[in-house]
Structure formats: C-alpha cells, structure tokens
C-alpha cells in the first residue's frame, strides 16, 4: 500500500492544469497494456481498478477531464484489451441487459436538440455500458487469490488520496457548520454522496482483504488503520450511504466465509476488533467534534426524498408500462408528480420508469447474473467475493445510482474465475500468450 498517495489528493487540488497528468498517465498505461498481447488481462485490470478508485478524486480536485472519463476511459481500455486478443464472445446476460436499454434512447431525440439528447443518453447509459464491458472482460479472466488481492489494493490506493484530502480540508477549514444535512466542507468541497460512497468502498475493500486473504501482521495493522480512516472520513461527510453499503457488503462477504465455526470466527475477529474500536471510541469522538450532530444524523431514519423519487418512478412505469418515458426523461415527467425535477438516486427504479417492460427485463438479467455467478464459483473465496461485491453494488445503486464507475466495474468482477494456486501453481490468464 503506497503511503505516497496520501498527499496526492491535496497536490491535485493545487496543481492547476498540471493535475491532468495524473489521469493521462493512468489511462495511457492502461491502453499500452491493453495493446500488449503478452500482458495478462488481470494486469490490465489493475490499471482499470486504479482508475475506478481515482475517479471521484479527479472530480473533487476539478481535474480538467470529461465528467464521465472514469466510465468511458475504463470501457475503452477493456474493449481494446479484449478485441486485441480476439475475445469476441460476450456473456448472454450482460448482453441482454444492455441491449434492453437501447430502444428507450429514441425518445430524448424528440424532446431535446441532438446535442443535448446525446449528452443525456451518454450520461445515463455510461454506467450500464461499463457494466456490460466489465462482465465481458472478467468472464475471460482466470486468476488467483493473490492477484485478486492486488486488484483490491489497486482500488484502495487512490482512495487513500480521497480520504486524506477530506481530512486535510476538514482540519484546515477556518469554520465548519454542522447540522443534520450532508456536509460539503468535510467532503473536500465536493458532493458528499459520491465522496461518502467511495470512502465506504475503501472500508469494504479493506474488510474484504482482512477477511479473505492471508496477510502478515504488519499488513493487517495497516489495513485496519486504513479501514478506520476511511470509515471516519465517510461518516464525517454526513452522507450515510457510503458506510451503510460498506457494512452490508462486508456482512454478506463474511457470511459466505463461514465454512465452519472455527474458520469463520478466525476471519471475523479482525473485523470485530475494528468495529468495536470505531463504535466505542472513534464515533463518540467524532460526535463530540460535531457537537452531537453526527449522532443526530445517523438517528434520522429519513431517506432524503429517495423513497418519494422511487415511488414517482413506479408511477411513471404504470403510466407508460411498455416503453417507459425514455432515457433521461424521468426528471422532466417527475415535475408533474413532485412539482419539481429530481434525478433518480436509485438505478433500479430508474430502469423501470425510463425503459418500461424492457427495464424489468434488464433488472431480471442483473438478478440472474448474481445467482449464476454464485453457483458457478467453486471456492469459498469465490462465493464470498460474489456475494459481498453484489450486495455492495446493489446498496450503492440504491443510494447513488450509477453516478460513478465503481459499481459497474465491480459488478463485472463477479464474473471472474478464481483458481486455487495450490493446485495450479502456474495459472495463465485467458487472452495472454
């Protein structure tokens, strides 16, 4: 784990136009490896994983790259790698999922100018495109637990920069006003929902590594500190979705790790220690720092209008059940129901309101992917990874739609085949010579 990434976020905030060198270098390395046929696919995946982890950092620091660079950049690297290795076969369910979303793209053409329609379609379907591409990519990958651990760390490393940036701008702020709403000041000046979600991903990835892989004591301590750091900065954004998704994903992963009581307890102990430390010591200190507002925020059972918005999506579906209202048009139609436009935070309700019966088909394809991938995995680690990642992705998409690339990429990761290196010491990745 590179501690050099801790100050990187603050450096990008203050680097001006030079900050663009970071995403350019990341993307360029991914493209180079994608074109090199001798480079294994799971090494290409490392660059995409790093890009996924860095996406929200670039948005926070206002690095001058396109808003959807994380999704389209990742999809480009993936497609280049697969096509260059002549791996053309796309799994059926991801193909069905994405194709089902295409017909509704015609409706924005009648409501907006061609340029605006293109932008809205691009924004809305960038997440589904990356999800399908990621499933395609990882369905061609056989890898070992060690390489999966490296992939997880590739996501985690840039998230250290995100966490440190939020910490730095919190402690250096002249004054922070705390209430029970999401806090931009403690989120590095960017959207608390997205920042909290990615910091929560840091918690989940750290917990996954601690519970799933053999690590030496020093590495366990570093991961434990990182997990507490991520959790601290996530809850301080006052956006609850990130930590909730982390807890949900971790519980699902731990549940599938229980082959027997002794083994399960052994894997559970580090997580219990960290949870106790955070709940009994760290959270009370943070609550005191915020004048009691943090506890008040987490005691609030409200959903920040997400339930109302989802309900309006269902109403739109019953009004337009066959075709839906069209891609990116639910906001416009929602004005009639709620009196004001509001973007859907829940991807699953958006699917049915904007795509109608085909959206339900896409939703069923997503559900089927989870169950098929769970049954396909032959190892405890494989099943635990599929379960934990799927739950994390679902909770992310309930809370923040597909606003970031992470859930799309990680959903595809459930298609990977994990081979036990003890029985196959020289595992080759498909697509590599």
Image (spheres, rainbow, N blue to C red):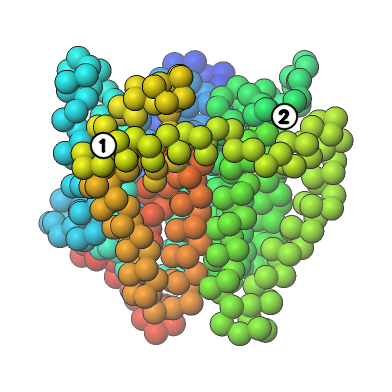
Residue at 51% across, 50% down? 395
Residue 354 appears in which quarter of the rendering?
Answer: top left
- Horizontal and vertical percent position of residue 227: 66, 51
Q: Is 134 displayed left or right of 230 in the figure?
A: left
Residue at 18% across, 57% down? 90
Q: What residue did someone put label 2 on?
A: 180
As helix, strand or loop, the secondary structure at mark 1 comes to loop
Q: Is 106 displayed left or right of 295 in the figure?
A: left
- Horizontal and vertical percent position of residue 288: 87, 35
Q: What residue did someone put label 1 on?
A: 320
Task: Say if 422 sits above or below 404 in the image.
Answer: below
Task: Say if 328 sits above or below 152 in the image.
Answer: above
Residue at 79% across, 32% down? 293
As helix, strand or loop, the secondary structure at mark 2 comes to loop
Residue 260: mark: none
Q: Is residue 18 visible?
A: no
Q: Is 284 displayed left or right of 433 in the figure?
A: right
- Which mark is in front, 1 or 2? 1
Task: Say if 294 sits above or below 412 in the image.
Answer: above
- Horizontal and vertical percent position of residue 427: 33, 73
Q: Quadrant of the C terminus?
A: bottom left
Residue at 61% across, 49% down? 244
* Label 2: how many Cα within 10 Å (few below 14, some 14–19, many 20+): some
- Horizontal and vertical percent position of residue 76: 25, 40
Q: Is 180 displayed left or right of 55 in the figure?
A: right
The one nearer the camera, 219 or 298, is 298
**Cα distance, mark 1 to mark 2?**
37 Å
Q: Is residue 244 visible?
A: yes
Going from the N terminus, do you reach mark 1 or mark 2 first?
A: 2
The one nearer the camera, 237 or 419, is 237
């Amino acid at each position: 784990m590179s501690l050099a990434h801790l100050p990187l976020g603050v450096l990008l905030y203050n680097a001006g136009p030079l900050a663009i060198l970071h995403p350019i270098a990341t993307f360029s390395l991914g493209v180079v490896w994608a074109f090199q046929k001798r480079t294994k696919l799971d090494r290409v995946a490392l660059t995409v994983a790093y890009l996924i982890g860095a996406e929200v950092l670039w948005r926070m620091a206002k690095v001058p790259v396109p808003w959807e660079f994380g999704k389209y950049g990742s999809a480009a690297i993936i497609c280049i790698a697969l096509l260059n290795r002549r791996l053309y076969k796309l799994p059926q369910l991801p193909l069905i999922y994405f194709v089902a979303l295409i017909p509704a793209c015609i409706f924005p053409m009648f409501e907006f100018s061609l340029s605006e329609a293109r932008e809205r379609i691009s924004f809305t379907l960038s997440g589904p495109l990356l999800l399908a591409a990621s499933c395609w990519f990882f369905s061609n990958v056989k890898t070992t637990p060690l390489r999966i651990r490296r992939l997880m760390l590739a996501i985690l490393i840039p998230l250290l920069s995100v966490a440190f940036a939020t910490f730095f701008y919190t402690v250096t702020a002249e004054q922070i006003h705390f209430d029970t709403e999401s806090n931009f000041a403690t989120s590095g000046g960017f959207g608390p929902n997205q920042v909290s979600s990615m910091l929560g991903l840091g918690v989940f990835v750290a917990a996954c590594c601690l519970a799933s892989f053999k690590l030496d004591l020093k590495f366990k301590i570093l991961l434990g500190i990182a997990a507490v750091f991520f959790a601290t900065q996530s809850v301080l954004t006052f956006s609850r979705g990130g930590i909730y998704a982390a807890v949900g994903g971790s519980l699902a992963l731990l549940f599938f790790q229980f082959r027997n009581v002794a083994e399960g307890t052994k894997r559970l102990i580090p997580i219990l220690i960290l949870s106790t430390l955070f709940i009994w010591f760290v959270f009370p200190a943070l609550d005191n720092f915020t004048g009691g507002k943090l506890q008040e925020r987490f005691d609030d059972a409200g959903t920040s209008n997400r339930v109302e918005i989802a309900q309006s999506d269902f109403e739109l579906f019953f009004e337009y059940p066959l075709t839906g209202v069209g891609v990116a048009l639910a906001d416009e139609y929602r004005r009639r129901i709620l009196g004001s436009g509001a973007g859907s935070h829940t991807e699953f309700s958006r699917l049915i309101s904007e795509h109608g019966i085909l959206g339900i088909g896409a939703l069923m394809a997503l559900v089927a992917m989870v169950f098929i991938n769970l049954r396909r995995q032959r190892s405890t680690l494989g099943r635990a990874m599929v379960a934990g990642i799927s739950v994390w992705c679902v909770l992310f998409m309930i809370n923040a739609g597909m606003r970031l690339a992470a859930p799309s990429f990680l959903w595809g990761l459930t298609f990977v085949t994990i081979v036990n290196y003890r029985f196959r010491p020289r595992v080759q990745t498909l697509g590599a010579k």
